[in-house]
Image (cartoon, rainbow, N blue to C red):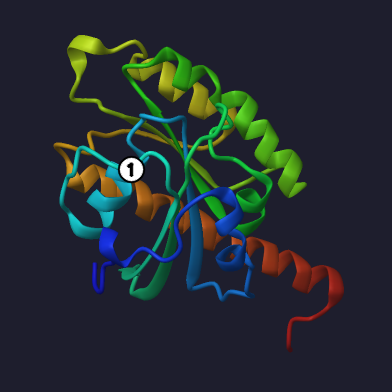
Amino acid sequence: MSNPGSPGESQGSGSPSTLKPYLRRKKSSLGETKIAVLGMAGVGKSALCVRFLTKRFIGEYDQASENKYKCTTILDAESVTFELLDTRSNNEDFGARDDVVRWADGFLMVYSVTSRKTFDVIPDTKRKLEEMKKAAHVPVVLVGNKADLAHARQVNQEEGARLAADMGCCFMEVSASEDVTRVVDAFHTLCKEIIDYKRRSRTFLDRVFGLKKS
Protein backbone atom coordinates (compact mmCIF):
# COMPACT_ATOMS: atom_id res chain seq x y z
CA MET A 1 0.00 0.00 0.00
CA SER A 2 1.49 3.34 -1.00
CA ASN A 3 1.07 6.85 0.35
CA PRO A 4 -0.89 5.84 3.42
CA GLY A 5 -2.52 8.48 5.53
CA SER A 6 -2.02 8.68 9.26
CA PRO A 7 -4.14 9.83 12.17
CA GLY A 8 -2.35 13.16 12.11
CA GLU A 9 -3.39 13.65 8.50
CA SER A 10 -7.11 13.20 8.97
CA GLN A 11 -9.19 15.73 7.13
CA GLY A 12 -12.07 17.22 8.99
CA SER A 13 -13.11 15.96 12.38
CA GLY A 14 -15.56 16.96 15.05
CA SER A 15 -19.29 16.99 15.56
CA PRO A 16 -21.74 15.87 12.84
CA SER A 17 -22.35 19.50 11.88
CA THR A 18 -18.68 19.93 10.90
CA LEU A 19 -18.79 16.94 8.57
CA LYS A 20 -21.01 18.46 5.93
CA PRO A 21 -18.36 20.54 4.07
CA TYR A 22 -16.20 17.51 3.24
CA LEU A 23 -19.10 15.13 2.75
CA ARG A 24 -20.22 16.98 -0.36
CA ARG A 25 -20.06 14.23 -2.91
CA LYS A 26 -17.97 14.62 -6.05
CA LYS A 27 -18.36 12.54 -9.16
CA SER A 28 -15.86 9.70 -8.85
CA SER A 29 -14.28 7.31 -11.34
CA LEU A 30 -14.29 3.54 -11.04
CA GLY A 31 -10.82 3.85 -9.52
CA GLU A 32 -12.01 5.81 -6.51
CA THR A 33 -13.91 4.42 -3.54
CA LYS A 34 -15.55 6.08 -0.58
CA ILE A 35 -15.88 3.78 2.41
CA ALA A 36 -17.71 4.48 5.66
CA VAL A 37 -16.74 2.35 8.64
CA LEU A 38 -19.89 1.80 10.69
CA GLY A 39 -20.40 0.32 14.13
CA MET A 40 -21.41 1.08 17.67
CA ALA A 41 -18.99 2.82 20.02
CA GLY A 42 -16.20 0.60 21.25
CA VAL A 43 -16.14 -2.00 18.45
CA GLY A 44 -12.73 -0.81 17.22
CA LYS A 45 -13.55 1.22 14.10
CA SER A 46 -10.68 3.66 14.60
CA ALA A 47 -8.23 0.87 15.39
CA LEU A 48 -9.17 -0.88 12.14
CA CYS A 49 -8.77 2.30 10.06
CA VAL A 50 -5.39 3.18 11.53
CA ARG A 51 -4.19 -0.42 11.30
CA PHE A 52 -5.10 -0.46 7.60
CA LEU A 53 -3.54 2.92 6.85
CA THR A 54 -0.34 2.70 8.89
CA LYS A 55 -0.04 -0.97 9.93
CA ARG A 56 0.25 0.29 13.51
CA PHE A 57 -2.13 -0.58 16.35
CA ILE A 58 -3.27 2.10 18.75
CA GLY A 59 -5.67 1.11 21.50
CA GLU A 60 -7.04 4.45 22.68
CA TYR A 61 -8.94 7.01 20.59
CA ASP A 62 -10.99 10.14 21.05
CA GLN A 63 -14.55 8.82 20.95
CA ALA A 64 -16.01 12.30 20.32
CA SER A 65 -14.62 12.99 16.85
CA GLU A 66 -15.08 11.67 13.33
CA ASN A 67 -12.13 11.42 10.94
CA LYS A 68 -11.63 11.04 7.22
CA TYR A 69 -8.49 9.52 5.73
CA LYS A 70 -7.19 9.02 2.21
CA CYS A 71 -4.63 6.68 0.66
CA THR A 72 -3.78 4.94 -2.60
CA THR A 73 -3.17 1.26 -3.18
CA ILE A 74 -2.92 -1.19 -6.08
CA LEU A 75 -5.71 -3.72 -6.61
CA ASP A 76 -5.63 -6.09 -9.59
CA ALA A 77 -2.96 -3.94 -11.26
CA GLU A 78 -5.07 -0.80 -10.91
CA SER A 79 -4.37 2.24 -8.75
CA VAL A 80 -7.27 2.77 -6.36
CA THR A 81 -7.88 5.74 -4.11
CA PHE A 82 -9.53 5.01 -0.76
CA GLU A 83 -11.38 7.63 1.17
CA LEU A 84 -12.22 6.26 4.61
CA LEU A 85 -14.69 7.84 6.97
CA ASP A 86 -14.25 6.62 10.53
CA THR A 87 -17.72 7.35 11.91
CA ARG A 88 -18.86 7.97 15.46
CA SER A 89 -22.07 6.47 16.79
CA ASN A 90 -24.50 8.87 18.42
CA ASN A 91 -27.43 7.44 20.38
CA GLU A 92 -26.65 3.95 19.06
CA ASP A 93 -27.21 4.98 15.43
CA PHE A 94 -24.28 2.78 14.30
CA GLY A 95 -22.82 5.86 12.56
CA ALA A 96 -25.30 5.45 9.69
CA ARG A 97 -26.51 9.04 9.51
CA ASP A 98 -28.13 10.39 6.35
CA ASP A 99 -25.10 12.43 5.23
CA VAL A 100 -22.74 9.50 5.78
CA VAL A 101 -24.92 7.03 3.86
CA ARG A 102 -25.34 9.41 0.92
CA TRP A 103 -21.59 10.04 0.76
CA ALA A 104 -20.31 6.48 0.89
CA ASP A 105 -20.05 3.96 -1.94
CA GLY A 106 -19.79 1.04 0.45
CA PHE A 107 -19.72 0.17 4.12
CA LEU A 108 -17.53 -1.80 6.48
CA MET A 109 -20.05 -2.88 9.13
CA VAL A 110 -18.15 -3.68 12.32
CA TYR A 111 -19.22 -5.42 15.50
CA SER A 112 -17.21 -6.74 18.41
CA VAL A 113 -17.26 -10.49 18.99
CA THR A 114 -17.22 -9.62 22.71
CA SER A 115 -20.52 -7.69 22.55
CA ARG A 116 -23.83 -9.26 21.52
CA LYS A 117 -25.46 -5.82 21.45
CA THR A 118 -23.12 -4.55 18.73
CA PHE A 119 -23.98 -7.60 16.62
CA ASP A 120 -27.75 -7.51 17.07
CA VAL A 121 -28.15 -4.00 15.63
CA ILE A 122 -26.59 -4.91 12.28
CA PRO A 123 -29.63 -6.32 10.39
CA ASP A 124 -31.71 -3.18 11.02
CA THR A 125 -28.79 -0.98 10.00
CA LYS A 126 -28.35 -2.93 6.75
CA ARG A 127 -32.04 -2.41 5.94
CA LYS A 128 -31.62 1.29 6.65
CA LEU A 129 -28.73 1.49 4.19
CA GLU A 130 -30.79 -0.16 1.46
CA GLU A 131 -33.75 2.11 2.10
CA MET A 132 -31.64 5.27 2.05
CA LYS A 133 -29.67 4.18 -1.02
CA LYS A 134 -32.89 3.00 -2.69
CA ALA A 135 -31.08 -0.15 -3.76
CA ALA A 136 -31.62 -3.86 -3.28
CA HIS A 137 -27.86 -4.32 -3.02
CA VAL A 138 -25.38 -2.07 -1.25
CA PRO A 139 -21.66 -3.01 -1.16
CA VAL A 140 -21.02 -4.19 2.40
CA VAL A 141 -18.46 -6.30 4.23
CA LEU A 142 -19.35 -7.57 7.69
CA VAL A 143 -16.43 -7.59 10.12
CA GLY A 144 -16.29 -9.17 13.55
CA ASN A 145 -13.45 -7.42 15.40
CA LYS A 146 -11.53 -8.43 18.54
CA ALA A 147 -11.29 -12.07 17.48
CA ASP A 148 -8.24 -12.41 19.74
CA LEU A 149 -10.38 -11.97 22.89
CA ALA A 150 -11.66 -15.56 22.94
CA HIS A 151 -12.20 -15.50 26.71
CA ALA A 152 -14.77 -12.68 26.38
CA ARG A 153 -16.51 -13.84 23.19
CA GLN A 154 -20.31 -13.42 23.03
CA VAL A 155 -20.80 -13.95 19.26
CA ASN A 156 -19.37 -17.05 17.64
CA GLN A 157 -17.94 -17.15 14.15
CA GLU A 158 -20.77 -19.27 12.77
CA GLU A 159 -23.31 -16.61 13.75
CA GLY A 160 -21.34 -13.96 11.90
CA ALA A 161 -21.06 -16.12 8.79
CA ARG A 162 -24.78 -16.91 8.91
CA LEU A 163 -25.76 -13.24 9.20
CA ALA A 164 -23.47 -12.32 6.31
CA ALA A 165 -25.07 -15.06 4.19
CA ASP A 166 -28.51 -13.69 5.03
CA MET A 167 -27.38 -10.18 4.05
CA GLY A 168 -25.64 -11.40 0.88
CA CYS A 169 -22.24 -9.99 1.80
CA CYS A 170 -18.71 -11.10 2.65
CA PHE A 171 -17.74 -11.82 6.24
CA MET A 172 -14.45 -11.76 8.11
CA GLU A 173 -13.37 -12.06 11.71
CA VAL A 174 -10.30 -9.96 12.44
CA SER A 175 -8.13 -8.73 15.26
CA ALA A 176 -7.07 -5.12 14.80
CA SER A 177 -4.45 -5.61 17.51
CA GLU A 178 -2.86 -8.81 16.19
CA ASP A 179 -3.46 -9.42 12.46
CA VAL A 180 -2.83 -6.57 10.02
CA THR A 181 -3.17 -8.90 7.00
CA ARG A 182 -6.80 -9.73 7.74
CA VAL A 183 -7.60 -6.07 8.36
CA VAL A 184 -6.11 -5.07 5.00
CA ASP A 185 -8.01 -7.92 3.33
CA ALA A 186 -11.29 -6.61 4.72
CA PHE A 187 -10.79 -3.14 3.25
CA HIS A 188 -9.52 -4.51 -0.06
CA THR A 189 -12.46 -6.89 -0.32
CA LEU A 190 -14.91 -4.03 0.17
CA CYS A 191 -13.09 -1.90 -2.39
CA LYS A 192 -13.35 -4.69 -4.96
CA GLU A 193 -17.06 -5.08 -4.17
CA ILE A 194 -17.58 -1.36 -4.78
CA ILE A 195 -15.66 -1.34 -8.06
CA ASP A 196 -17.54 -4.43 -9.32
CA TYR A 197 -20.84 -2.82 -8.33
CA LYS A 198 -19.98 0.40 -10.18
CA ARG A 199 -18.99 -1.52 -13.28
CA ARG A 200 -22.20 -3.55 -13.25
CA SER A 201 -24.25 -0.40 -12.74
CA ARG A 202 -22.49 1.40 -15.57
CA THR A 203 -22.95 -1.54 -17.93
CA PHE A 204 -26.65 -1.67 -17.06
CA LEU A 205 -27.09 2.05 -17.73
CA ASP A 206 -25.22 1.72 -21.02
CA ARG A 207 -27.63 -1.01 -22.10
CA VAL A 208 -30.73 0.86 -21.01
CA PHE A 209 -29.85 4.25 -22.46
CA GLY A 210 -27.69 3.13 -25.38
CA LEU A 211 -24.69 5.07 -24.17
CA LYS A 212 -22.07 2.48 -25.00
CA LYS A 213 -20.00 3.45 -28.00
CA SER A 214 -19.90 1.06 -30.90
Residue at (26, 27) in percent of width and height = 146
Q: Position of residue 61 (x, y in %)?
A: 28, 42
Query: Where does the N terminus fall, quadrant-wise?
Result: bottom left
What is the quadrant of residue 147 in the picture?
Answer: top left
Residue 139, above or below 74: above
Tell which of 14 and 123 is nearer to you: 14
Residue 71, above or below 182: below
Residue at (35, 46) in percent of width and height = 186
Query: Where does the C terminus fall, quadrant-wise?
Result: bottom right
Q: Position of residue 65 (x, y in %)?
A: 42, 47
- Of helix, strand and loop, which one carries label 1? loop
Q: Position of residue 38 (x, y in %)?
A: 49, 40
Residue at (74, 64) in percent of width and height = 204
Residue 53, above or below 180: below
Q: Is residue 21 visible?
A: yes
Instruction: Name the residue beneath numbered marker 1.
Output: 62
Label 1: how many Cα within 10 Å (few below 14, some 14–19, many 20+): few
- Residue 167 relative to residue 193: left or right: right
